[in-house]
Amino acid sequence: MSANLFIVPHDFTSVGDAALKYALYLAKPRKTSIELLHIVSNKSSKKAAMQKLNSIIGNLDLGVGDVDVKAVVKVGNIFDDIGKIAEDKEARMIVMGTHGAKGMQKLFGSYAIKVVTSTSVPFLVVQEGVAHREIENIVVPIDVSKESLQIINVAGELAKVFNSKVHVICESQKDPRLSQQMKIRISLVKKEFQEKDVNSSIEMIKGSKSYNHKVISYAKSVKADMIAVAYHSSALFAAFDTYAQKLITNDENIPCLIANSKLLSKLYY
């Protein structure tokens, strides 16, 4: 994450407002700039959209030395251009809102996965009505795949900035081969966080319920302020889209940091 910039897509709803407020909170410690982005389908809509964005920014009551927020309107489509814009600008993160599992509109819901997988820039997905709070606990679920570890550095960076604790969790494996793979993954994570002096713990969780249910239950038990996960689809996890989507729209309204592990592999860990 080279550029000191966040991209915040805004759909002129309270969901966009929630994402912007959260982005402002994240941006302040490092004076990260924010580009408030709206995608339009044709040039004739650009002027009205720009006026709306500038009105939103004008109501933020930003002071001297505060985070710089700039309005950006682009002609295109949400599936291709949000990620492309963020990559072209080498943004650190895209902070996006979602209406949750019901009443989804455009990108801000089930289509989020399509956008997340289109870019190497990590997404932080914030649900409607979620106010920012201190990021004291970040839950990071991993699995036996090496791809799941690609979120480790991103989560570690956030933990260092906000002095957070990272709770790495994984499922207990009955199969000897998978159990050995999990031990290798755990040792890599421990080494990484020790070298970076990140406050962390690793816990193996058991139970018969789905992994996403166990992740959310654990996050609730430690009062997590964020869940961070690497997105990857493979034959081993055929239902990964559903798993990731349920984390994004979790009933506890915990913000979810999600990144495409295949694209991140060139940049992290």
Image: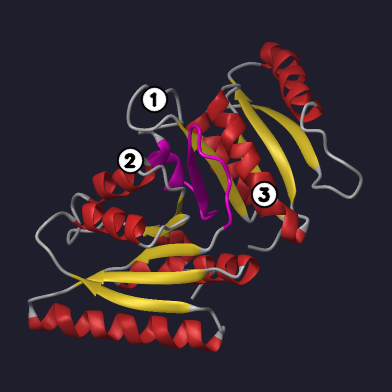
- Give the mark nearer the N terminus: 3 vs 1: 3
| Residue 156: image location, x then y, percent | 53, 71
Q: Is residue 89 visible?
A: no
| SS type, badge 3 | helix
| Amino acid at dot 2 | Asp
Residue at mark 2: 251
- Labels 2 and 3 touching (C-beta < 8 A): no
Displayed quadrant of residue 183: bottom left
Q: Nearer the viewer, mark 1 or mark 2?
A: 2
* Distance of label 2 from label 3 (alpha carbons): 23 Å
Q: Dot 2, crowdedness within 10 Å: few (<14), some or many (≥20)?
A: few
User: Which part of the image, by quadrant, shows the N terminus?
Assistant: bottom right
Is residue 149 located in the magenta-colored stretch of the structure?
no
Residue at mark 1: 104
- Give the mark nearer the N terminus: 1 vs 2: 1
Residue at mark 3: 25
| Residue 80: image location, x then y, percent | 51, 36
What segment carries the magenta color? 112-134
- For image coordinates 70% across by 52% down, the residue present is 27
- Labels 3 and 1 touching (C-beta < 8 A): no
* Distance of label 1 from label 2 (alpha carbons): 15 Å
- For image coordinates 36% across by 44% down, the residue present is 252
Displayed quadrant of residue 38: top right
